[in-house]
Image (spheres, rainbow, N blue to C red):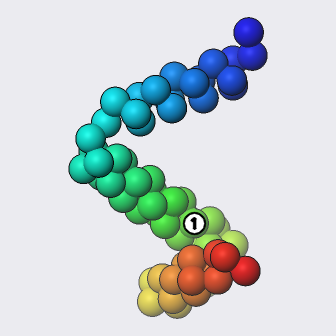
Amino acid sequence: MDHLAQASRIQTERFRQMTPGQRWTAARRLYWSMRRLKEAGVRAQHPDWCDDRVRAEVKALFLRARD
């Protein structure tokens, strides 16, 4: 069996067992984890940028994410 397909089925079943509040919490955690990872990536690309500029760039990237 394909491990990715099996993992996807297990994950889907786990999400179905969660309450709406638990799913919301999981989504929020994922969102903020993604923001921290993106911030780390921007910092690695631009080590000379100050914190405010890095945060502004991450914010802009997330705002444009649908484009």
Closest to the observer: 56 or 27?
27
Q: Residue at x 69, y 25 (%)?
A: 4
Please tell me in which quadrant of the rendered image residue 43 appears: bottom right
Residue 32, image x and y in percent?
41, 62
In the rendered structure, the answer to whether residue 25 lies left or right of residue 52 reads left
Q: Secondary structure under badge 1?
A: helix
**In the image, residue 55 above or below residue 17:** below
Closest to the observer: 23 or 59?
23
Residue 62, image x and y in percent?
57, 77
Residue 42, image x and y in percent?
62, 73
Residue 16, image x and y in percent?
40, 33
Q: How many marks?
A: 1
**In the image, residue 19 above or below residue 58:** above
In the rendered structure, the answer to whether residue 36 lies left or right of residue 58 reads left
Q: Residue at x 45, y 89 (%)?
A: 52
In the rendered structure, the answer to whether residue 28 lies left or right of residue 4 reads left
Q: Residue at x 57, y 83 (%)?
A: 63
Please tell me in which quadrant of the rendered image residue 57 appears: bottom right
**In the image, residue 28 above or below residue 13:** below
Q: Is residue 6 at least partly visible in the picture?
A: yes
User: Can you identify the residue that label 1 sits on?
Assistant: 38
